[in-house]
Amino acid sequence: MTDHSPRTVRAARGTDRTARSWQTEAPLRMLMNNLDPEVAERPDDLVVYGGTGRAARSWEAFDAIVDTLRDLADDETLLVQSGKPVGVFRTHEWAPRVLIANSNLVGDWATWPEFRRLEQLGLTMYGQMTAGSWIYIGTQGILQGTYETFGAVARSIAARRALAEGLDASVHVTDASLAHTLTLTAGCGGMGGAQPLAVTMNGGAVLIVDVDETRLRRRVEHGYLHEVALSLDAAVSRVLAAKAAGEALSVGVVGNAATVFDELLAGGVPIDIVTDQTSAHDPLSYLPEGVSVEEWRELAASDPEGFTERSRASMAKHVAAMVGFQDAGAEVFDYGNSIRREAELGGYDRAFAFPGFVPAYIRPLFAEGKGPFRWAALSGDPADIAATDRAILELFPDDAHLRRWITQAGEQVHFEGLPARICWLGYQERHLAGLRFNEMVASGELSAPVVIGRDHLDSGSVASPYRETEAMADGSDAIADWPLLNALLNTASGATWVSLHHGGGVGIGRSIHAGQVVVADGTELAAEKIARVLVNDPGTGVMRHVDAGYDRAVEVARERGLRVPMLDG
C-alpha cells in the first residue's frame, strides 16, 4: 500500500528527466518546488503561502498528480480540479499538458463559510494564485512587483514635494528614492516578506510588524530583512535614526499590527508611508488582539464564526490607525489583501478612505500590458539564472529601471528552491526574452530548460474589485469575462499549463484570475508556442484597458499592432 503521509519534497535538478519530456518534467518539478521547505510556509500541510494556499488537495492527490505527470504523453492533457487529478484526455502536442481549476464556486455560493464546508468534505481547496498553479518561486516572486510599487510611491512623494516647491515634477521624479522616509507595514509571511527588501532597495527605512517571530527570523536568514528588534521602542529608535541619516534599513518587531499601529499613531511617530500585507483576505489567517500564536489554529478551527468576528474587530482598529496616519499626511495604500473590506465588515465606516495600490500606482503599467514575467531554471544551477540576467540586460539596454532591478536582484536576492528570477515586461517585450531563453537552451548556454510564467496579478488576467481592477475608468471592476478569455486564449496559444482560480489575493467571492506557464526546452515547437503565448497573454491586458477607455492602452495597441475590432469603430 502506498504511503500518502507528509514528507520532505524537493524538485529534481540537472538534465536527467523522470517524465517522458521536458513539457511534463517542467510541471512536475515546479509542483515539487512549490512544496520545497525553502519555498512553502507549511509544506507538511501542502500549504505554500497566503494563509491556506495549497499546491495539492491531499498527499494522496499529490502522489497521483506526480505519477500521472511522469507517464503523461505529449498528446495528452491532465485535468486538475482544486488540487485533485480527475482525468487524462488525448489532445495534441499544441494543447496544454495540464489544465487546472481551483476554488471556483457559483456566485451565490462563493462565501468563506460555504467554501470551508466544501473543503472539509474534501471537495475543494484554496489555490491562492501561484500556489495551486505550481509557479510560486518564493518571496522573490512578489519582491519585484513590491519593488515596482514602492518605486512608484517614491515618485509620487517626489512629485508632490516638487509641486509644493513650485518645481517641475517631471524632472524631479526621474531618480526618486525613498531616502529619508520611514515606511510602516505588517505581515512578513510568504507575500509580505518581500516588503522590507523592496523598501530598502528603493533607499528607504522600514518597520515591519508580525505576530510570528519565526517569520521575521526567516527573512533575516534569507537577506530580506536586516534585523529583528527586541522591543517596539528599540525598533522605532533604529528606524528613525536611519530615516534621519537617509540610510536604507529594515527592522522587524514582534507584535499585533492592530495594537502596534495604533500605539505608533498615538505616539506621533513621524511615519511617511503606511501599508499592510497581513493575511487579511481570510479572517481565520489574521490573528486578532488577545489571541496568542500558540492558540491561533485551534481557536480558528473550533469557532470559525467567532474567530472571524474578533479578527474583523482587530482589522477595524488596524485600518482606523492607517486612516489616522493618512489624515496626518502619510502616503497610505491597501496592498491587495482585502483588509479594507474586512475592516468595513468589522464596523469601521472609513475603511475605504485610502486607495488600493493598483489604482494608486500600477494601472499605467497595466495599460501597457506590463506586468510580472518570471522564470525558473529547471537545472537548479544559479549560473543559468545569471546567464538569463545578462540576456535580459542585452535585450533591453535602454531600460535603466530594469537594469537597476536585475543588478540588485543578482546581488541581494536569496534563491528559495529552484533558482528563479522575475522582472516586469510589457506587450511585445516578453516574447523576446522567451525566445532568447529558448535559443540559449538549444545552444547549450543554459544547461537545462527554463519555465516561463507569471503571477496571476497581471494586466489582463484578473478581475478583482478590491485589488487589480479597483476603480476601473469604465466601472467594469467586477466583470470576470476578462480572466476567462485570458485562460482560453493561453490554452489556444500553446501554453504548457493553464490555470483558472477564484479568490486568490483577496479571498473567496472577491476575485477570478488566470495563469499560464510555457516551457523553453530549446525546440522549434517551443519557440512557436513562446512566440504566441508571450505576445497574446500580455496583449489581453492592453485589450482589456483599451476597452475600459485608457488612452495609454489605445496608444500601445496602435503603436504595437494589436487588433481591437471596435477601437476605430
Image: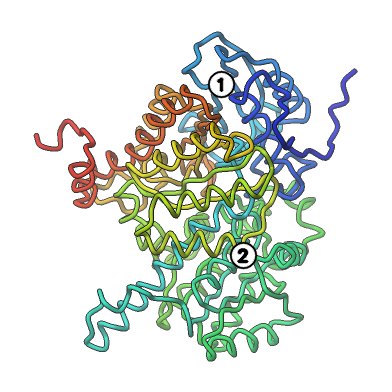
The furthest residue to the left: 569
Taking 557 as reference, is 262 above or below it?
below
Nearer mark to the viewer, of 2 and 1: 2
Taking 318 as reference, is 386 above or below it?
above
Q: Is residue 249 left or right of residue 362?
A: right
- Depth check: give the residue in front, 302 or 464: 464
**Quadrant where the N terminus lies?**
top right
Res. 383 visible in picture: yes
Q: Which residue is mark 1?
A: 97
Residue 412's label in the rendered image is 2
For marks 2 and 1, give the CA distance: 35 Å
Amino acid type, residue under disc 2 in the picture: Gln
Q: Name which of mark 2 and mark 1 comes first in the sequence.
A: 1
* Crowd tier of the residue under label 1, counting other residues whose Cα lies within 10 Å: few below 14, some 14–19, many 20 or above: many
Which residue is drawn at the image coordinates 52% and 56% (left, top)? Answer: 342
Taking 263 as reference, is 214 above or below it?
above
**Quadrant where the C terminus lies?**
top left
- Depth check: give the residue in front, 129 or 247: 247
The furthest residue to the right: 1
Which residue is drawn at the image coordinates 78% and 25% (left, top)? Answer: 60
Question: In the image, residue 532 lies at what x, y percent?
Answer: 38, 29
Q: Is residue 139 left or right of residue 548?
A: right
Q: Determine the secondary structure under disc 1.
A: loop
